[in-house]
Amino acid sequence: MEHSLDISSLLPVLAAFGLTPAKPPVPFGSGHINHTFLVHSFEGEKYILQKINTQVFQKPEAIANNLSLAAKHLETHAPGYLFLTPVHTLTGDEMFVEAGEYWRLTVFVPNSMSINEATSPEQAYEAARQFGLLARHLNGLSMNGFKATIPDFHNLTWRYQQFQQALDSSSESRKKEAAECIQYFLRSKLIVDTYQVLLRNPDFPDRLMHHDTKINNVLLNTTSQKGLCVCDLDTLMPGKIISDVGDMIRTFVSPVSEESTDFEKISVRLEYYEALMNGYLSEMKYVLTPTEKDVLFFSGPFLVYMQGLRFLADFLNGDVYYPIRYPEHNLRRAQNQMVLLQKLFANEDQLNVIIQDALA
């Protein structure tokens, strides 16, 4: 994450929110999208200031719109729920906009922490339960008025078309280097076909989903490590249950991340899969439709396959989207996701037993 901003330039931004910092704001967190700073006030309060990345979020107003609509629903239906809404500016706006830059401020949650990876099933359970709790509190909310903050973000049909376009335009040398991976993703197109059939199913509703359910988007209590709330709500928008469940599976269950090139270490840790299913379904199993229950296993392959396609397409396109540290980086990421996808299918029977037990 780039933090080349002059700290003094933040003072007018903070003044718009009525804040004078007690000491210089400092870069905060491990996110790669927005500029994030921790701010201390003279009153002893702490805040999180973020500059929204308008290359990723081209219509930041959509973020503010979705958070406002969700907050109004939660105020009525779950008044005690901790939902991180922005602090308003002195003029009553949810963001401060100046020279095409969008800034927002939220209160720092006391005694909270975030972690970048699950190192125990208990952590996986707590994080998944928080995502489930948010989804349950938003259950029944009409999608009217909500907007896509990143259009087609989890549209697998579109991602597959992007992959095909990359194949058509890629150099022969890149296609040759990625041949095995390309063939696997082409052979696995049944995942796309299944997704397209699901979209036509009236029992597969749109819900307000988080869409980025990595464990570092949940705040845990610093002492007990119990879940406190969900954070980083930029991608809160209409979507499907498979997005949130799938991204948890993709990022919780393997002992190594998508960055690992030690493919032998990629595995499906059954105890983590069980923990996340138990955590999420402890909140959501009573509101899911029969079709949503039926596709819980599919959620994992859906998201892993889509992310693998994105890495592979970027490699074929000459690495124009994801930052890379070495020439084959995106190919190795795609191969990593290919192995994880294979491991999910190899464990399908056991994973479905876990799901049924969690639904019981």
Image (cartoon, helix red, strand yellow):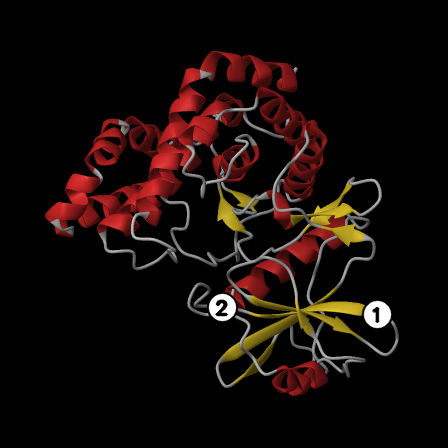
Taking the image as shown, residue 175 lies to the left or right of residue 127, namely: left
Mark 1–mark 2 Cα distance, whole angstroms, equals: 26 Å
Secondary structure of residue under mark 2: loop
Q: Earlier in the sequence, mark 1 or mark 2?
A: 1
> Who's the residue at 45% across and 39% down the image?
260
Q: Position of residue 316 (x, y in %)?
A: 22, 49
Contact (CB < 8 A) between labels 1 and 2? Answer: no
> Who's the residue at 43% across and 22% down the image?
343
Q: Does any portion of residue 209 appear in the rendered image?
A: yes
Q: Position of residue 249 (x, y in %)?
A: 53, 32
Rendered view: 40 above or below 75: below
Q: Which mark is residue 53?
A: 2
Rendered view: 10 above or below 237: below
Rendered view: 199 above or below 220: above
Q: Which residue is mark 1?
A: 45
Query: Residue flagged by tag 2: what amino acid is it?
Result: Asn
Q: How many discs mark residues in the rendered view?
A: 2
Secondary structure of residue under mark 1: loop
Quadrant where the image shows the C terminus: top right
Q: Does any portion of residue 91 appear in the rendered image?
A: no
State which quadrant residue 325 falls in: bottom left
Q: Position of residue 111 (x, y in %)?
A: 83, 53
Q: Residues within 10 Å of mark 2 (few under 14, many from 20)?
A: some
Q: Nearer the viewer, residue 327 or 11?
A: 327
Taking the image as shown, residue 98 lies to the left or right of residue 298, namely: right
State which quadrant residue 107 falls in: bottom right
Query: Residue flagged by tag 1: what amino acid is it?
Result: Glu
> Who's the residue at 43% across and 37% down the image?
303
> Who's the residue at 44% across and 23% down the image?
344
